[in-house]
Image: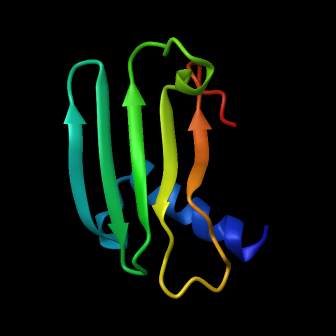
């Protein structure tokens, strides 16, 4: 596994397992019975948006149960990480 993949996996694992010592800030953007959106800030400056929804979305890019997206890369960024979706967990626990 590359260092980049390890770093991205650490962000996702930290959020899934709620390892609060790994992130310095957590901000809830939306919260309802059907949808949650939060942004997590890590010590290296990276920000990851976590999205959960209880029902399938209507568009193909909305068809997920859990989605993790890098919204701000770490600083410094020697691995040249770019903003975008890191991991998607579909309904039925199929990860992509």
Left or right: residue 32 versus residue 23 is left
User: Residue 24: x percent and y percent?
Assistant: 27, 72
User: Residue 2: x percent and y percent?
Assistant: 77, 71
Q: Residue at x 60, y 45 (%)?
A: 87
Image colouring = rainbow
Q: Residue at x 66, y 27 (%)?
A: 94
Quarter of the image where the N terminus is located? bottom right
Quarter of the image where the C terminus is located? top right
Q: Nearer the viewer, residue 16 or 7?
A: 7
Left or right: residue 29 versus residue 1 is left
Q: How many marks?
A: 0
Snapshot quadrant of residue 32: top left
Q: Residue at x 48, y 84 (%)?
A: 75
Snapshot quadrant of residue 25: bottom left
Snapshot quadrant of residue 61: top right
Q: Residue at x 63, y 70 (%)?
A: 81
User: Residue 80: x percent and y percent?
Assistant: 66, 76
């Amino acid at each position: 596994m590359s260092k980049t993949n390890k770093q991205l996996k650490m962000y996702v694992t930290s959020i899934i397992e709620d390892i609060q010592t790994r992130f310095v800030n957590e901000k809830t953007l939306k919260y309802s019975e059907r949808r949650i959106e939060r942004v997590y800030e890590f010590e290296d400056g990276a920000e990851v948006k976590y999205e959960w929804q209880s029902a399938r979305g209507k568009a193909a890019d909305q068809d997920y149960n859990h989605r993790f997206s890098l919204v701000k890369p770490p600083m410094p960024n020697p691995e040249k990480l770019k903003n975008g979706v890191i991991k998607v967990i579909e309904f039925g626990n199929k990860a992509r």
